[in-house]
Image: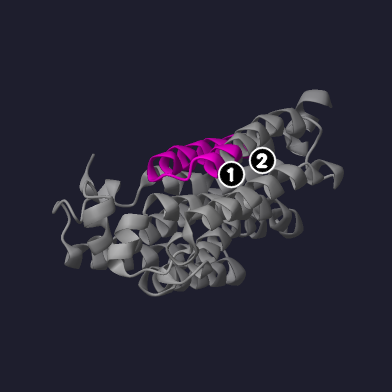
Amino acid sequence: MNPYLEIIRPGNAVMAVIAVLLMAVISGVFTFNVLIACAVVFIINGAGNVVNDYFDHRIDVINKPHRPIPSGRVSLRVAGFYSLALLLIGTLLAFSLGLLPGLIALITSLLMVYYAYRLKKKLLIGNFVISFLTGLSFVFGGVVVGEITASIYLGFYPFLTTMMREIVKDMEDIKGDQEEGAKTLPLVYGMKTSAVVAASFMILASVTSPVLYFMGILTIFYLPVLLIAIVIFLSGAASILKDRSIENAAKVSGRIKIGMIVTLLAYAVGSPFLMSLFFY
């Protein structure tokens, strides 16, 4: 893969795009502005990944030596200019959608840079920020399609699942973070406490997520697909509590990502708009 494409981690950026598309599917609003919004979140999310790699290049030499910067395929200086250009383009596109989408994109861009520069090494604050930004993708989509309230509820669960995955990833990356002097939860309070906190988020998300159906935001078809995600999350919780090794943390992190994808699928299947197409 081209290193300039690889460094934006297009798979992760597409996940952000899916948040906007889901809000379009749930609301039944399909306009050209939705396409622009998809481009905005893809570009800004990609830029955030570049910024993150820029500030993490020393840690990545240990944890992720195959990435474009530590492997020497993209220079540190070029990565810096690349990320700033992407952030500028994404923010300008967002302002073309209106003042509120533009402000959300601007705040997101600034927060991404500050997160990578300083907040990432702060105990739980960095985890919270990246999880907040994940949920904010839904709110951004909700603003564009006119479903702000629903987007806040829908964005809350990606926030929870991202929190659990971020903590598990900190467990996975503990060696490199220790070399860099980061103050992550595993380094400050240990792997056992981290496993308990991560598992708690998994259980909280699993137990409360059906409420989106009972609130009338999603239809009953949401529940059967959600059940698969719940099984994945609860098995991940049991696994990380039983085995707190770096190797298992990597496996559980991947399992959580699968659960997150299934949850997004449940959102789509449970869309009132889709239900109206099939039954009316």
Q: Is residue 234 left or right of residue 193?
A: right
Instruction: Check disc 1 and report its element: helix, strand or loop.
Output: helix
Q: Is residue 46 part of the magenta span, yes or no?
A: no
Q: Amino acid at mark 1?
A: Leu
Nearest to the observer: residue 94 or residue 206: 206
Q: Which mark is residue 25?
A: 2
Query: How crowded is the residue under tag 2: few (<14 C-alpha within 10 Å), some, or many (20+)?
Result: many
Question: Quarter of the image holding residue 149?
Answer: bottom right
- Judge whether 174 appears above or below 251 on screen: below
Disc 1 + disc 2, Cβ < 8 Å: yes
Name the disc covering residue 41, or none: none
Q: Name the residue that disc number 1 marks.
A: 21
Name the residue at 64% across, 34% down. Answer: 229
Specify the amino acid type for callout 2: Val
Name the main secondary structure of what is drawn in magenta.
helix
Whole-percent x, y for residue 236 in the image:
57, 38
Give the x, y percent position of residue 239: 54, 37
Report the residue at 52% width, 35% height from top. Answer: 258
- For mark 2, give the secondary structure: helix
Name the residue: 32% across, 68% down.
84
Residue 212 place in picture, x, y as percent? 78, 45
Residue at the location (54% across, 40% down)? 242
The vertical placement of 36 against 216, above or below, is: below
Q: Nearer the viewer, residue 26 or 32?
A: 26
- Magenta range: 238-264
Residue 70 seen in the figure: yes
Q: Is residue 111 left or right of residue 128?
A: left
